Image: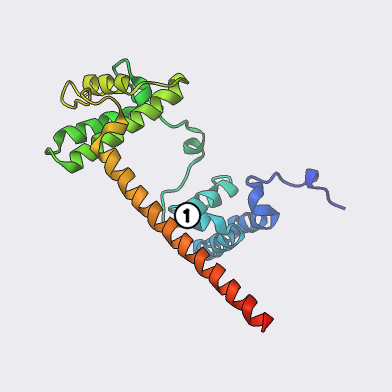
Amino acid sequence: MEYNTDRTQLLMPEYGRNIQQLVEHCKTLQTKEERNEMALAIIEFMGQRNPHLRDEENYKHKLWDHLFILADHNLDVDSPYPILTAEELITKPRKMDYPSLENDYKFYGKSILQLIETAIALEEGDEKDALIQVIANNMKKSYNVYNKEHVQDDVIFRHLKELSKNRLDLTGLDSLDKSKIYYATNRNNNNNNNRNNNRNQNYNNNNRKNNFQNHKNKRR
């Protein structure tokens, strides 16, 4: 009996020993044409064994990279992609600079600043008012999550005014609930709720009538 501990180490266990052995056999073929043909067959087999890779971007490229890893980077075949070397595999990726915000309100995030700039650039009107409403509500949510405490709307308004350099000003409102957008949204929601309630009431009344009529018919 042959134990796995006595066999060669699997370079990528997720592909199994059969594919590892096929790669090792491919390396022993005499001509490059034979190796190319077998390499393509192995790539196809690898894709069948790992169908989840098909959902990833450039999955064929990844399969070819895995093939060279399985071959311990010692396989002379024509690859449709740049051949992965052992040095590239162990090289650490370049450290990405984390975007920093140069203000006292870092907890709002960079996306809020971008939305503020977008709102500033819009012409006066409902679209601009709606975007300012969205910004203020998201600022309030971010503040509550970061500081773990409830914040008054007037604080959000002051922060919005400062972050926009006085170009977006909601300080005239007592609260977000007083904005015309809030009322318009609530009015639509209330109308929808009233319509749904009326439908349900009519449905219940019809059911009661039908049940009463069925009861009368049975008594006859």
Left or right: where does residue 187 sit relative to residue 40? left
Q: Amino acid at mark 1?
A: Tyr
Residue toward you, 4 or 181: 181
Residue 137 location (% of width, % of height):
34, 32
The tally of labels here is: 1
Left or right: where does residue 67 sit relative to residue 144? right
Q: Residue at x 64, y 50 (%)?
A: 14
Vertical placement of 163 versus 186: above or below? above
Left or right: where does residue 134 sit relative to residue 145? left
Residue toward you, 21 or 34: 21
Look at the image and tell me whether residue 96 can be seen.
no
Q: Residue at x 47, y 32 (%)?
A: 91
Residue 26 location (% of width, % of height):
59, 59
Q: Residue furthest right?
A: 1
The quadrant the C terminus occupies is bottom right
Q: How is the image coloured?
A: rainbow
Q: Which residue is mark 1?
A: 59
Q: Residue furthest left?
A: 123
* Image quadrant in which you'd find residue 21: bottom right
Look at the image and tell me whether residue 219 can be seen.
yes
Q: Residue furthest front?
A: 220
Vertical placement of 167 versus 8: above or below? above
Residue toward you, 35 or 172: 172
Residue 41 location (% of width, % of height):
55, 65
Residue 217 location (% of width, % of height):
63, 82
Q: Assess disc 1: are there few (<14), some (14-19) or many (≥20) residues with their C-alpha within 10 Å of its C-alpha.
A: some
Q: Residue at x 68, y 53 (%)?
A: 16
Residue toward you, 114 or 197: 197
* Image quadrant in which you'd find residue 47: bottom right
